[in-house]
Image: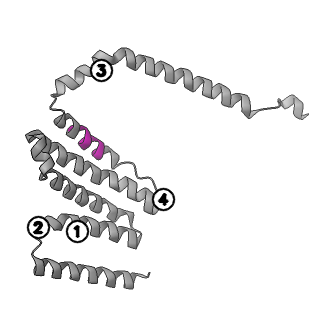
Amino acid sequence: MNKSVRSGVLLIIAGVIFILFRTFNFGENLVLPLMGAGFITWSILWRNKGLMIPGGILSGIALGVALSESGLAERMGSEASGALFLFGFAAGWFVITLFTHLFFNQYVWWPMIPGGIMAAVGLITLLNSNLIDVTILPGRFWPVILIVIGCYIIWNQFRKDDAAGHIYEKSPKDLV
């Protein structure tokens, strides 16, 4: 599809959306999801992975708002509303990485950083823990951490030894 046809399709879609908003008075609840979906669609159709960023962010905010205003948030308690918003917002950042890989066959890893931070803060909020309790956990489980690191070192060494044994089936003297 050439750029003129894509531009025409985009204008038709925008016009239909505006007519639907004026006719049926959907309100502001659909603005963010439609904007996010619009940027994602625009990104895919125009093969421009940069447009995936505002699409993912807007879609994540829309999901976060929907989750924080849902009945689930009311049943879970007051802290859950903020945590659910952060989970939705984090999902939007993860969508950037996922969709860029799916549609552009490129791995863009940096959105995982803000998404991971938001998900971690949301989890801490949801668990209703304070930061001091979270920092005490490694102190209680440090022996397990040492065991896991030790197992990894041993496994990695065996893997290297095994791979080294298969690289050269013959010595250089056998080639002469």
Amino acid identity at mark 1: Leu
Number of callouts: 4
Residue visible at 43% across and 82% down in the picture: 2
Residue visible at 66% across and 25% down in the picture: 161
What residue did someone put label 4 on?
Answer: 105
Q: Are marks 3 and 4 in contact (CB under 8 Å)?
A: no
Q: Are marks 1 and 3 in contact (CB under 8 Å)?
A: no
Q: Secondary structure at mark 4?
A: loop
Rendered view: 35 above or below 24: above
Magenta stretch, residue numbers: 114-121
Residue 28 forms part of the magenta stretch: no
What residue did someone put label 2 on?
Answer: 28
What residue did someone put label 1 on?
Answer: 34
First in residue order: circle 1 vs circle 4: 1
Q: Report how far apart the C-alphas of labels 3 and 4 lie in the structure.
A: 38 Å
Amino acid identity at mark 3: Pro
Q: Nearer the viewer, residue 25 or 151?
A: 25
Q: Report how far apart the C-alphas of labels 1 and 4 lie in the structure.
A: 25 Å
Rendered view: 166 above or below 94: above
Residue visible at 13% across and 52% down in the picture: 70
First in residue order: circle 3 vs circle 4: 4
Q: Tell which tag, 1 or 4, sits nearer the viewer.
A: 1
Q: Report how far apart the C-alphas of labels 2 and 3 lie in the structure.
A: 44 Å
Crowd rating for badge 1 (residues with CA inside 10 Å; few <14, some 14–19, many 20+): some
Quadrant that contains the C terminus: top right
Q: Tell which tag, 2 or 3, sits nearer the viewer.
A: 2
Q: Report how far apart the C-alphas of labels 1 and 2 lie in the structure.
A: 10 Å
Amino acid identity at mark 4: Asn
Q: Report how far apart the C-alphas of labels 1 and 3 lie in the structure.
A: 43 Å
Place residue 147 in its image quadrant. Answer: top left
Q: How is the image coloured?
A: one colour
